[in-house]
Amino acid sequence: MYLGIDLGTSNSAIVGTDGETLRLFKTVEGMDVMPSAIMIDRRGGLFVGRKAYDQSAFSPQSVQQKFKRLMGTGSTVDFLGTDRVLTPEEASAEVIKSLVGQARRDLPEMEIEGAVITIPAAFNQMQSEATMRAAKIAGLEKISLLQEPIAAAMAANTGIGGGSAQFLVYDLGGGTFDAAIVQSISGNITIVAHAGVNMLGGADFDRAIVNNLVRPWLLETFNLPENFQTDARYSRLIRIASYRAELCKIALSSQQVDHVSADENQIGTKDEDGTDIYLDVEVTRGVLENLIAENVERSIAECRTLLSNNGYSPIDMDRVVLIGGPSRMPYVRERVAFELGIALDTNVDPMTAVATGAAIFASGRNWAADGATTSRTRRAATTSSSSLQLRFEYIDNTASPTINLKVRTPIDPVPANVYVQIDAANGWTSGKLPLSSMVDVKGVPLPRVGSNEVKVSVFGANGALDTDASAVLKVTRLAATADGMPLMHNLAIKIVKGGIGAEHNKLHVIAKKGAPTPARGMESFRASRDLRAGEKASLAFELFEQADDVDDPTLNLAVGSFELKGDSLIPGQIIRKGDRVNVHWSIDANSLLHCHFEIPDAGLYHSLENMYVPTSSASNFDGQDGTQLARGGIDDARKDLEYLERALGSRIGAQSQKLRSKLEAQETAVALSHDADTKRMVTQEARFLRQEIHRLKHDPVNVSAVQQIELDDFENHYARYFAKEVEPETNTNITRQLASARDALRRGDLQESRHALEEASALLNGFMLKQPGFWIAQFDGLVDSRFNAIDKKLHDRLADRGQQAIATNNVDELRNVVIEMYQNTVREAGGGDSGILSGLML
């Protein structure tokens, strides 16, 4: 049995197939989907699914949901009524176990030939790896990942009998939004292009109800502090309100009015005056639609941009395939159809289509023992044992409803009056065709999914059937096929650029978004500094998912770090600055990255997988640490925007106002947040805002004005703090370079102006790196960022070492401490590089 598992944020489903018949395995309650919810009671009993979900109304502290949105982070899933703590991967594994248990309840003797688990196309490297870990924890052995839009299209394709079509997949789930242009050519599915938002889904609609309707009602009805949503005393109230808000949202898909309601006994919480709190908030469908309108319009805008950026218009799409529970909302369906002008596919069940498509995909793959898969579509050839030496050439596994069959003979001359006839199981026949050196029969039908027989009959000169020359060919028709997952993000390595003194970190793309997988390649770099055996320092190889047109590492998502430490070198071994570093990379069919590197000049070869430090990119969004991460991202975005406004003023008035509104929305979200999910969402949105600001800053029409501000700021800063401190010769050279930069800017030579400013910066950096104050400032910044440390105890020990180095004026030791503290810092937060340069350069 091949299994397809839709591991969803809110709901999950499982479908199995033997290659011919699809079977949806229902829950014990007889439902098509199972809530992705876990409950652990005070006695340690663990429950998954509907029973756990329903307990949200009575024991909310013992129930956890939506942990999929924390996959790939350092956050935990805490069950407050017990001492149990799970990682998001462990929690997801419990959901997978329960789903597989549903299948085994129906088919106790089932052998799993392979299991495909779907992931949002917007998932990053860390989230995909976390999903694989969850599947292995659940006990699955042969596992493959598949992007949800591909699975949805494979399910939709069965409705057209494996023919050809072009879909726009609109996948609005509980936690993520994906849009994809998908082509089906004779049943083979390919993603042409993709867009998506990693943290946009039904959970955000629930939050909007709580923050905009329930919160004001509670503040008006009861005596509660303004920050009650982040006050631990009211955590039970917020959990029940969130649960009831979700039920209300679902109900409003089929009725015009509902209530977010719960009585005093359920809530079990008193306000500041000792009054029992209850909930009775009326919500109309119209009010809900107003609350979610902005997010729905954002999803539609993603679809429009996706189409236009790839040269498509709505008329090029046959239909829109709607996937995910929130896509069932009447408002979403109406807006998508109206705004995009594309007909909706009403034959696909939004709740089970992804699991169905995953099962179809699983059955169309060849599975190796380690879970690696390859397409089953292949060409076959059969040779008869007769004197005619006939050779039959065809595809024996295909998603197409027809095949082409070639009958060849090497006999020359071909005997006269010999005929070939092809017959299909549905009664179709080619009729008798005269044998030639090659008889090409096109369009032989395969009437059923699964095994089909194609009969080849050969008739001799006497008209009798030649049984030795005839054959019955077995052809498997697959419901649909797909070649694999295209890479959904640019993968990049951080490198050092710039001349001596002007070095800075940039990203270098090694694999571009949209590239087919599996793929492999090699990139050659050079070591950016010396590394000697026994040193505490290291050469870092940091990996990022790079946004289009944004090569600044601080504005992108770090997904891993590989570090070669000095104490891992053998005594006497040294890597010198400029030594070649060859990075060999491969991306498997699950879009997961594997690397190894070699430094030929030093005779070193290392598998980066053995050095991978996943926690270096796994931020912890729990508690106060998560709040500081989110607020830090907002502060960075605000500074970027203020800088851009100074440079461009009214030129970007409308854009500036829009960006400020987005910032305010994130500030409100984090102020009202008590959960890691919201803080992660805010951190991500802040990064997206910074990327948007970066693109505005580097728009050709804005570059001159931005460069003018950079030059003014540098001159003012230099004159105020450094001009009297640097050596006279250095001061003269910096002043000369600044004059050249200003002159070039007046002439419109932006490249020359940039070069002169970088030269001035290099001269100043050379001076600063010699100053203890520079390293003290770097150290102080890292000490204050304890919330962003991977190992808090190590951070504290390094802080003590740094303080001692400052007290003894040991600049070299302080520099080493700063480097080690940076290596103990989560990269994802995007708080800057702390002056630490990459270990690689071109």
Image: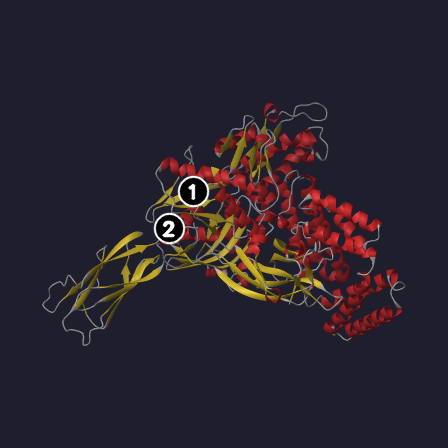
Neighbour tally class for label 1: few under 14, some 14-19, many 20 plus, Cα within 10 Å: many
User: Where does residue 660 sit, x and y in percent of width and height?
Assistant: 71, 52
Instruction: Indicate the amino acid at tag 2.
Output: Ser
Q: Nearer the viewer, residue 101 or 279?
A: 101
- Rendered view: 730 above or below 317: below
**Which image quarter: residue 771?**
bottom right
Please state, as top left, top right, bottom left or bottom right, where the N terminus lies in the image. top left
Is residue 346 at least partly visible in the picture? no
Residue 130's disc is none
Helix, strand or loop status at disc 1: strand
User: Where does residue 289 sit, x and y in percent of width and height?
Assistant: 57, 43
Q: Horizontal placement of 177 versus 21: left or right?
A: right
Is residue 417 at least partly visible in the picture? yes
Please state, as top left, top right, bottom left or bottom right, where the C terminus lies in the image. bottom right
Instruction: Indicate the amino acid at tag 1.
Output: Ile
- Number of numbered labels in the structure image: 2
Report which residue position mark 2 lands on. 363
- Rendered view: 1 above or below 506: above
Q: Which residue lies furthest to the front in this view?
A: 571
Residue 14's disc is 1
User: Where does residue 8 sit, x and y in percent of width and height?
Assistant: 50, 43
Kindly report which numbered mark, 2 or 1, lies closer to the viewer in this rendering. Answer: 2
**Which image quarter: residue 833?**
bottom right
Q: Which of 276 and 269 is in front in this view?
A: 269
Q: Horizontal placement of 468 versus 405: left or right?
A: left
User: Where does residue 298 sit, x and y in percent of width and height?
Assistant: 59, 52
Residue at x-position 75% and y-position 60%: 650
Q: Which residue lies furthest to the right in this view?
A: 724
* Of callouts 2 and 1, the N-terminal one: 1
Residue at x-position 57% and y-position 49%: 296
- Rendered view: 321 above or below 212: below
Q: Which residue lies furthest to the left in this view?
A: 462
